[in-house]
Amino acid sequence: MKQVVKKASFIASVCMAVLCCMSCGGSDDPVSPVTPPTTPDKPSAKMPISISTNITRATETAFESGDKVGLFVVNRNTDGSQAALLTTGNYVDNMLYTYTNVWTPATEIYWKDNKTHADFYLYYPYRKQVESVTVMPFSTKANQSTEADYKAGDLLVGSTLDAAPSTEAVRIEAKHIMSRVDIRLKPGAGFTESSLAAANVKVSLNNIKTSATVDLATATATATGQASTITPYNDGSAYHAIIVPQQVAQCNLITVNVNGRDFNLPKAFTFQSGKRHTFTVTLDKTSSGVNVTIGAWENDGNDNGGSAIKVKSEE
């Protein structure tokens, strides 16, 4: 019995010694490598959306400091197909951008992510409220005798489709949607340069609609409303007007009044979007009319010339 007790005591002592060794040898034992916790991927840095423009304005050759445009951004569908431009509910709706050597948004906007492509739609001049992107109302002034009223009709619309996310500016080509008319007067028989310059001259374009609806997605304008008479802007060398694209039926399209006497150009004409139509009018007191030549802003390959008829006055 005593031997059994001694054996049990010995075994207990050995166990205690082993436990002590295990608890005291911590610093010298090899340390198992600790696996750090998994760090979630950092989200990609947001890329701000910036734009640049390339235009040929009807009245100018470039944007001016302080010009304001509206921008719509429509993200592509997940399969890459094009989504429709809406009046509201797009990724970006009618964001104001102001030009001061670069385009600056009213509020910083960002790409959705680094892979979703988008379509960009731009228009000028900016308006706070766009009633419809498919039938946006727009009008030119009937009296364009001042430079400001003449330039106010210069509507620009542009788009860049399927743009990939980038830190580079999205380049948008803006095109003028209206039609431009230049009327130049030349002295003919009975006139000289000096007598024509000294004369009281008034020029008008007749039977012209000044209102339109504009589709920003297709960059097209449709003339609406009643026709009226346009008074063009005289810059000292020619008379200029911005016209809504339209077909005008046969009428006295242009009237030049010199010291109370009218010279009329009877003509049917189609004013085309993005075209400049130049009418060079040679005034002749002794003939039945004036010579008119028309050159398109972009050459349409046609000779659109005609003759004007002097209105007889009672003498």
Image: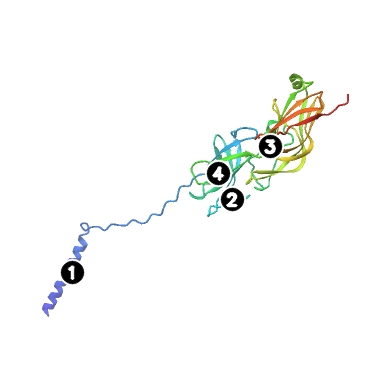
* 54 horizontally vs 150: left or right: left
Name the residue that disc number 1 marks: 15
Which SS class for mark 2?
Answer: loop
Q: Position of residue 229 (x, y in %)?
A: 77, 36
Q: Are marks 3 and 1 in contact (CB under 8 Å)?
A: no
* 135 horizontally vs 190: left or right: left
**Amino acid at the residue labelled 4:** Thr
- 2 or 4: tag closer to the N-terminus: 2
Q: Which label sits on residue 107?
A: 4
Q: Nearer the viewer, mark 2 or mark 4?
A: 2
Q: Which label sits on residue 171?
A: none
- 1 or 4: tag closer to the N-terminus: 1
Q: Position of residue 259 (x, y in %)?
A: 81, 24
Q: Alpha carbon of mark 3 to alpha carbon of mark 1: how far?
A: 104 Å
- 1 or 2: tag closer to the N-terminus: 1
- 3 or 2: tag closer to the N-terminus: 2
Q: Alpha carbon of mark 3 to alpha carbon of mark 2: how far?
A: 30 Å
* 270 horizontally vs 53: left or right: right
Which SS class for mark 4?
Answer: loop
* 251 horizontally vs 237: left or right: right
Dot 3: few (<14), some (14–19), or many (≥20) neighbours within 10 Å?
Answer: many
Q: Which label sits on residue 179?
A: 3
- 3 or 1: tag closer to the N-terminus: 1
